[in-house]
Image: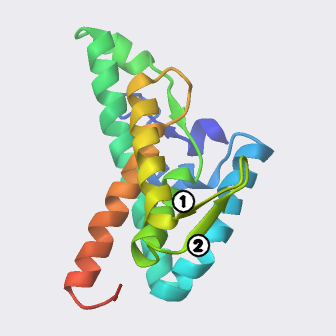
């Protein structure tokens, strides 16, 4: 399933447009699924209440697709730098992205914007902090880890979810569709 539904590099002969959606519903094991769903439960239930069910679904899908787009762009830049113009190299790259993390990071950003002073307690170690600081620290950490690279995690997909969430929330706020 990962081969057909996971998000392949745009340059890969296995890339399909539908993968911009389907990749979000695959995970790399129980731990990956558990942490995405735990974060979705923690921050998503409140965000869904704030946005309403229909708008929340649109938000979730849009941030997940936005995460995929940024991931494809960064992946394409990395491949281009490594390929040195070789089209065979472009097509041979088998980078596959899976998981709901990009959409979950979008929800995390939404929670931080709509409830900036809400206290969150990190479990290990137990540190209480305001949601706005948690989101900022996590975003900066993802940027640092993404630039460093080499760990097999799509950090720029996480950032893409946050960026698209910010844009969508600001758009809805300007249109008077949400208030925070």
Circles 2 and 1: CB atoms closer than 8 Å: yes
Task: Pick the residue in front: 163 or 92.
Answer: 163
Quadrant in the rendering for residue 59: bottom left
How many residues crowd mark 2 within 10 Å: few (<14), some (14–19), many (20+)? many
Residue, x 53% and y 33% (percent of image)?
96
Q: Looking at the image, can residue 16 be seen?
A: no
Q: Looking at the image, can residue 10 be seen?
A: yes
- Real-space CA distance between mark 2 and mark 1, rounded to the nearest whole angstrom: 8 Å
Task: Pick the residue in front: 56 or 1.
Answer: 56
User: Looking at the picture, does residue 9 appear above or below residue 59?
Assistant: above
> Is disc 2 placed on a helix, strand or loop?
helix
Of the residues under marks 2 and 1, which one precedes in the sequence?
A: 2
On residue 115, the disc is: none
User: Looking at the picture, does residue 75 appear above or below residue 44?
Assistant: above
Q: Which residue lies furthest to the right in this view?
A: 30
Q: Can you give x and y, in whole percent of width and height, for residue 119 in the image?
A: 58, 70
User: Looking at the picture, does residue 130 appear above or below residue 17?
Assistant: below
Task: Pick the residue in front: 48 or 141.
Answer: 141
Left or right relative to 109: residue 164? left
How many residues crowd mark 1 within 10 Å: few (<14), some (14–19), many (20+)? many
Residue, x 47% and y 33% (percent of image)?
14
- Quadrant where the N terminus lies? top right
Quadrant in the rendering for residue 122: bottom right
Label 1, on which residue? 104
Task: Pick the residue in front: 133 or 42.
Answer: 133
In this rendering, the count of numbered labels is 2
On residue 44, the disc is: 2
């Amino acid at each position: 399933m990962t081969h057909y539904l996971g998000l392949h590099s745009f340059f890969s002969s296995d890339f399909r447009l539908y993968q911009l959606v389907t990749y979000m519903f695959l995970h790399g094991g129980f731990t990956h699924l558990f942490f995405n769903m735990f974060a979705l439960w923690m921050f998503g239930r409140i965000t869904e209440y704030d946005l309403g069910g229909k708008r929340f679904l649109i938000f979730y899908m849009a941030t997940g697709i936005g995460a995929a787009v940024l991931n494809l762009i960064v992946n394409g830049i990395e491949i281009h730098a490594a390929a040195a113009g070789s089209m065979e190299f472009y097509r041979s790259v088998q980078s596959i992205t899976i998981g709901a993390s990009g959409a979950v990071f979008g929800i995390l950003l939404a929670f931080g914007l709509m409830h900036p002073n809400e206290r969150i307690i990190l479990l290990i170690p137990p540190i209480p902090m305001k949601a706005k600081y948690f989101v900022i620290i996590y975003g900066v950490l993802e940027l640092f880890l993404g630039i460093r690279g080499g760990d097999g995690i799509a950090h720029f997909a996480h950032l893409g979810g946050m960026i698209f969430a910010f844009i969508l929330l600001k758009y809805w706020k300007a249109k008077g569709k949400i208030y925070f």
